[in-house]
Amino acid sequence: MTTEELRQATSPQWCSPPVLVAGWGRFPVCEARLCANEDLGLVTPHGSLSRGLGRSYGDAALPAKRGDALTSTVLADRLLSFDPETGILRAEAGCPLWRIIELFLPRGWFPPVTPGTKFVTLGGMVAADVHGKMHHSQGTFGQHVTSVLLEVADGRRIECSPEHETELFDATLGGMGLTGHILEVAFRMQRIPSPWILEEVETFPNVPALLSALHQAGQHWPFTVAWADLLNPPPLFGRGALMKGRWALPHEAPSRLPQPPKSMKLPAVFPNWFLQPWMIRWFNRVYFYRAQRVRGRRVVDPESFFYPLDAVLDWNRVYGPRGFTQYQCVLPAEQGLEAHQRLLDRLLELQAPVFLAVIKDCGQEGRGILSFPRPGISYALDMPLSNRTQQIVDDLNDIVVKGGGRIYLAKDALTRPEHFRSMEPRLERFLTVRRKWDPTLRFRSALSARLFGDDP
Ligand SMILES: Cc1cc2nc3c(=O)[nH]c(=O)nc-3n(C[C@H](O)[C@H](O)[C@H](O)COP(=O)(O)OP(=O)(O)OC[C@H]3O[C@@H](n4cnc5c(N)ncnc54)[C@H](O)[C@@H]3O)c2cc1C
């Protein structure tokens, strides 16, 4: 028996019968078989799309064809090495971010970039080239990745990095799993002065004031994010809060470690009718008053600062079986306030049910060919699905195309291919690299079928 055969014979593997899977937005829903193995490279059938913890909102981690297999990476979750001299951590692609934080925060390290949830895998972070409240200061996650071990369509394992097989590396950052299976990821962790965050909160009466403060804050604070009420009618429409943060210095921080936060779990999927706009209007008022109350500086634990939504596990169930979408776009900095005003006016005209609006400042574009962020302002808008949602997304995409912006594939479920092509001059380059490594397009997803025209 060869070593390879021995590994195959002893490596536990499971494949589920067809089950219904969806992204975090619970739309669309698709039948798939999930196959997993502790050794990602051994999962059969070979060449099926990878899926991490399913925290992308739309159809990025769904099969192109109903019933197809997905490679679930969650069993391949080992930490492989850590060098405290360089801060480089190497781990299997299914390793969840929460585990890295649990192990490293008490030891004075933190990932340089984190999205708004810790329930993601390293593979998912690379494939979406995630960004966070630190994009203006630290860029995307991919900017801190030193190498990726990738299994490509013909079964070869390729180590790619900023120095080696660079084209493949650049297509894999933000390539939504379409260049191959990411088996291992190495990236540079960041040293932190204490395990606490110093946060400052301010409130503003409208979006222009919020945007100007967000931009100013980015020059002094490594972490910034804004929340805006885009649901209540004027004059409340657009007022919001700006949260700024940095790691607390040792003399500013409590001497104890932050307690692991308590989280609650929604017990069941709520009925579609449960969440009504009037409830969220009230929630937004309360949230704004609360922000006014806590204005100023305080020391907070990093989990409540970076992951406020993780306090309620499975919170997406509140939207009911119909689900919701998160529309996320970035409008270029050079467009000025006009494009923003068009977007806001359109939301008002359409009376779009924006239940949550998060605004972020994006810094320099990274190297990922299809990575989302570019200098400008990003809007992430959560909306329950209804028969009006497609029209709202189409209208917003018209504005984004005209404004030279783009949308984020990790959140998208409804963008039309013609809109995507108009906003993505980088698409041809991505497709060329993809075809070079995967001429028969073995790695396909519902998203690539919808937006790139892959045969399902
Ligand atoms: C509450 C919440 C907040 C969020 N906040 C942010 C944010 O602030 N910034 C941000 O950028 N994103 C954010 N996201 C989105 C999330 O970070 C990304 O969608 C991320 O990719 C999810 O990781 P995952 O492991 O769940 O991947 P999945 O959702 O399972 O997969 C996402 C994509 O990655 C591919 N993929 C996964 N693993 C591999 C692998 N091993 N090899 C190849 N391809 C792979 C899949 O094929 C798919 O295309 C948020 C999501 C939620 C639910």
Image (spheres, rainbow, N blue to C red):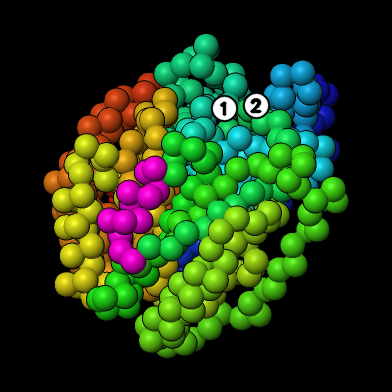
Q: Which mark is residue 144?
A: 1
Where on the picture, by quarter, is residue 396?
bottom left
> Residue 448 magenta-drawn?
no
- On the question of residue 340 being in view, the answer is yes
Q: Which residue type does callout 2 highlight? A: Arg
Residue drawn at x 26%, y 40% as measured from the top left: 332
Give the secondary structure at mark 1: helix
* Above or below for 308 versus 89: below
Q: Determine contact: label 1, label 2, CB under 8 Å.
A: yes
> Residue 210 magenta-drawn?
yes
Q: Which residue type does callout 1 highlight? A: His
Which image quarter holds the N terminus? top right
Looking at marks 1 and 2 on the same chain, the residue that comes earlier in the sequence is marked by 1
Mark 1–mark 2 Cα distance, whole angstroms, equals 6 Å
Q: Which residues are drawn in magenta? A: 205-216
- Residue under circle 2? 188
Return the x and y of residue 268 as percentages of the image width and height: 61, 81
* Above or below for 152 versus 412: above
